């Protein structure tokens, strides 16, 4: 039997991290690349050896990856990236091509799914792209070879004349309940290397699950390039068994459901929680919801099943701004009511806000701040709006304000887009004022200290990287 070299899969990190710089985002929140691990498990289930390298978690491992490439000489290198890690992915691809000139480099992820042929036109080091869902397309690609790319759905490739072409999206998505669990065992340092946002978990080790794909809504700021308008989800039985597997195999104590709409199918959540209540797995969990899809009985049921924190997308406290950008309800009074329901159920509530959307003004920022401070939130997160490729606003961003399309900095940590009527300097001031006002409120520091006391591992992480946190706070 002839030796078949393994397929190498890489989760890219930002280019500056691959040059050994530190990003505060990697200290605050670092979760395993479950999408890439799902593809690894799918390949393995079909008899294809696979190795995984997470350079987002281990940027210093690039030399080790190069050494492994020389040892194993794989035919295929799959690299997953988002917008802010794309240039890092190109660095990895270039390094691989220098070592193994004949290796086929295939990119995937939301950034390349959105831009498709533009990526191949501008990046000769990339041989092909997977646009959309990756499991079936990547399996067919590594089974049939680069020369058969025109016959594989969901692939962007170059024809014999060098012209970039897209074969079209697949019409046969995978059945989520038929997928093997992600290949956690292929991931170096799992689960200990990874951690959720400070204060946002009671115990370690932790893990994450993506239990659905797509979103039924169409907000202007969301990237829809991978799953487009589709929306489907795992069954309660599959999720329960997945949780049991993580507990038994890795001792996982806390789980984060990384779904935009975890409670969209109420019956699924009720069934899952009933299973967890009847036969607990020794695990708490967090999830994200929309106000339209929660109610007091459901929240009480989730609490009994181990729900520890619920994040709710609020975005803005200005109804006029919400009406321009948010699909579904823009009723902020409904948001207030739902957050009180979450708190009444004994679950922590985290509010997710966004600053800098097109149409943002100093007045709308003031309204958002006042609204945020009126809510009984345990924690809040304020991101800096970024028009990502694949979102409806991306194509119009240059018409709606100033847009510095620097992909390395498009990570929601800087104002790459500045709406008309504001300046980048003023936005940064308003952002800093928002957080400073938040922490100056009576009792806020005591509340965060209490949250730290309820999450002992957060103390360890906070003290280990105190210098980075303080530097970030001073510069905010």
Image: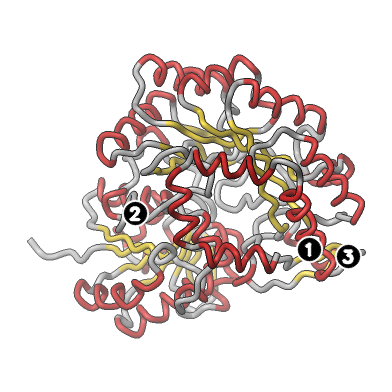
Residue at label 2?
139
Q: Quadrant of residue 412?
A: bottom right
Q: Secondary structure at mark 1?
A: helix
- What's the mark number on residue 422? 3
The total of numbered circles placed on residues is 3
Observer-nearest of 154 and 328 = 328
Q: Of tags 3 and 2, which is closer to the observer?
A: 3
Q: Quadrant of residue 214?
A: top right
Counting other residues with Cα less than 10 Å from the Cα at mark 2, is it few (<14), some (14-19), or many (20 or more)? some
Counting other residues with Cα less than 10 Å from the Cα at mark 3, is it few (<14), some (14-19), or many (20 or more)? some
Q: Position of residue 105 (x, y in %)?
A: 39, 71
Task: Name the residue: 41% across, 76% down.
Answer: 93
Q: Position of residue 208 (x, y in %)?
A: 43, 43
Query: Quick one: label 2 or label 1, which is nearer the N terminus?
Result: 2
Residue at label 1?
397
Residue 348 vs 13, above or below: the answer is above
C-alpha separation, residue under disc 2 versus residue under disc 1: 36 Å
Observer-nearest of 295 and 380 = 380
C-alpha separation, residue under disc 3 versus residue under disc 2: 48 Å
Query: Quick one: label 3 or label 2, which is nearer the N terminus?
Result: 2
Q: Of tags 2 and 1, which is closer to the observer?
A: 1
Q: Position of residue 132 (x, y in %)?
A: 52, 52
């Amino acid at each position: 039997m002839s030796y078949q070299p393994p397929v190498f899969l890489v989760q890219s990190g930002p280019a500056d991290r691959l040059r050994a710089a530190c990003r505060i985002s990697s200290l605050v929140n670092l979760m395993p690349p479950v999408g890439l691990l799902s593809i690894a498990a799918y390949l393995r289930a079909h008899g294809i050896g696979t190795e995984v390298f997470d350079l987002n978690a281990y940027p210093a491992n690039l030399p080790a990856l190069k050494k492994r490439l020389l040892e194993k000489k794989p035919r295929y290198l799959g690299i997953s990236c988002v917008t802010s890690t794309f240039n890092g992915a190109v660095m990895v691809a270039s390094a691989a091509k220098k070592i193994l000139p004949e290796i086929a480099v295939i990119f995937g992820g939301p950034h390349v799914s959105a831009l498709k042929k533009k990526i191949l036109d501008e990046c000769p080091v990339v041989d092909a792209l997977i646009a959309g869902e990756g499991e079936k397309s990547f399996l067919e690609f590594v089974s049939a070879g680069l020369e058969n790319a025109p016959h594989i759905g969901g692939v962007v490739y170059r024809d014999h004349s060098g012209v970039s072409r897209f074969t079209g999206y697949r019409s046969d998505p995978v059945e989520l309940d038929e997928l093997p669990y992600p290949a956690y065992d292929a991931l170096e340092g799992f689960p200990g290397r990874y951690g959720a946002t400070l204060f946002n978990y009671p115990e370690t080790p932790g893990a994450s699950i993506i239990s659905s794909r797509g979103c039924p809504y169409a907000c202007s700021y969301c990237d829809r390039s991978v799953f487009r308008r589709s929306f489907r989800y795992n069954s309660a039985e599959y999720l329960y068994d997945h949780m049991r597997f993580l507990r038994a195999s890795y001792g996982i104590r806390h789980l984060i459901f990384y779904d935009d709409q975890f409670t969209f199918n109420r019956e699924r959540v009720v069934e899952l929680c009933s299973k967890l209540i009847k036969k607990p797995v020794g695990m708490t969990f967090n999830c994200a919801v929309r106000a339209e899809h929660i109610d007091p009985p459901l929240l009480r049921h989730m609490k009994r099943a181990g729900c520890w924190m619920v994040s709710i997308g609020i975005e803005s406290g200005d109804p006029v701004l919400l009406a321009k950008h948010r699909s579904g309800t823009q009723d902020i009074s409904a948001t207030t009511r739902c957050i009180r329901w979450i708190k009444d159920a004994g679950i922590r509530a985290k509010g997710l806000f966004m600053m800098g959307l097109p149409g943002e003004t100093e007045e709308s920022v003031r309204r958002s701040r006042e609204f945020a401070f009126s809510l009984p939130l345990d924690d809040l997160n304020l991101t800096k709006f970024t028009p990502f490729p694949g979102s409806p606003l991306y194509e119009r961003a240059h018409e709606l304000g100033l847009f510095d399309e620097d992909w390395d900095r498009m990570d929601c940590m800087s104002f790459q887009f500045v709406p008309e009527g504001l300046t980048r300097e003023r936005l940064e001031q308003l952002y800093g004022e928002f957080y400073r006002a938040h922490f100056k409120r009576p009792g806020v520091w005591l509340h965060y200290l209490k949250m730290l006391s309820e999450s002992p591992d957060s103390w360890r992480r906070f003290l280990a990287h105190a210098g980075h946190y303080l530097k970030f706070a001073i510069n905010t």
